[in-house]
Image (cartoon, grey):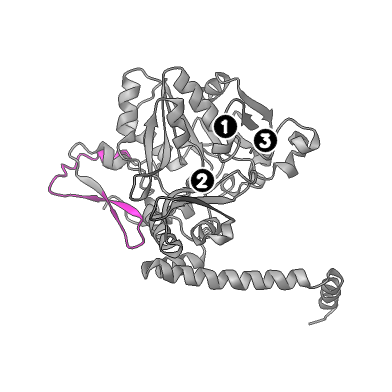
Amino acid sequence: MLFEEKKNCCACGACVQICPKQAISFEPDESGFLYPVVDETRCVHCGLCEKACGFRKEQPQPTRLAVYAAAAENIDRAQSASGGVFAGLAAKVIDDGGVVFGSAMQYDGNEITVRHRAVRTREELIRLQGSKYVQSAMGDCYRSARESLEKGETVLFSGTPCQIAGLYSFLRKDYSNLYTIDIVCHGVPSEQFFQDYLAFEEQKIGKKVTDFRFRDKSKGWKLFGKMAAVDGQNNPSELFFEPEESSYYQLFLNGYTYRENCYSCPYAGGFRPGDLTIGDFWGIEVVQPELLKQNGGPLDEEKGISCLIVNTDRGMRLLESAPEIRLYESSFEKAKKYNGQLRESSKLKPEREIALALYREGYDRLEKWYRRRLLAVRIKRGIRRAVPKWVKRGVRKLIGHNPA
């Protein structure tokens, strides 16, 4: 084992890709999370795998240069989760002859997979846009990025903070032609968990799921999802849903299904490993309402607004090279107010152990548990809405005057 406890491994893949003897591979645990395993018959004990582990290294103090509310012009923001900043920067790199690495959700005719991949054209870039609330398999992208860097190509690499830290540890040297973007990440469920959920949905609706969007903007910049499917005659259909209608989605938002290390993430806070950090600017209507179009400001909240943190001089140079990114000054205090992962890692809750234990018995067992909980929540919610406000005030007043 390359780690003493599961919380010490984020499965970035740096150890797997740096091993000169291909002695390390990933194997799933009982909940579908991948962990590296060493083939001792191949291992030569060179120690490169331990040196390449960026997750357990001591983190420096944050070096933030600027924070913005941002949105991209000349980019189809309908395909992006927030303000399209990543797509705008990636398009600039591609136009200049560079290569962009990021996470893509793809249907291969049999199942939906989430993999990191390289793209070199604007047409391919759409594959990397949008949120994927699933752990993305890195494959050999660190090696591929190094090859491109050695050739002198400009490389833009995006991923979760631990994946960016893994890239730097794998490379072990600085490249002036490398730019990195880390996303504001809550945590990641396993791909196997996601695929088992899709299989459950397919059985329920009697169709094959061919695409899944966690953040569809047909109804604006919110958390609505969309699922595409085909029947036995290949007739397509689409299903739009709110998070509560999808057990996978809502369990993710509740923080019940992440990898163990996500609950003690060293990057969930002020220090960010990427040159730039990008996420949704949640709560901007509270902290900077003057920027919104509905208030006469320049940013259209229906199309999405990005929180953009500049961490390095290199990140600032990349940003300055893309004038189509519209920037409006903000602060880290404003950005983190409604972005919990800019303050601390997700909280480990007792429901995680329950949810994963039920999942191991079959996704249908987990689904039943989730539906019962959801029904209870909706009943309580309905009762609260049904009781007049004057009754609530009277009860609170009565309780407040009760000596007990």
Mark 2 or 3 closer to N-term?
A: 2
Task: Quadrant for residue 284, please give it.
Answer: top right
**Which type of secondary structure does the marked residue at label 2 adopt?**
loop
At label 1, the amino acid type is: Asp
Residue underneath mark 3: 331
Residue at the bottom extreme of this rendering: 404
User: Residue 178 in magenta?
Assistant: no
376 is higher (above) or lower (below) than 195:
below
Q: Residues within 10 Å of mark 2 (few under 14, many from 20)?
A: many
Among numbered discs 3 and 1, the one appearing first in the sequence = 1
How far is disc 2 from disc 3 in space, using C-alphas? Answer: 19 Å
Residue 55 placement: quadrant: top left
Q: Does 345 sit left or right of 119 as displayed?
A: right
Q: Which residues are magenta?
A: 26-52
Residue, disc 2: 185
Name the amino acid type tagged 3: Ser
Find residue 398 and report its horizontal and vertical position in percent: 85, 78
Disc 2 residue type (three-letter): Cys
Res 76 label: 1
Place of residue 46 in the rendered image (x, y in percent of width and height, measured from the top left): 20, 39
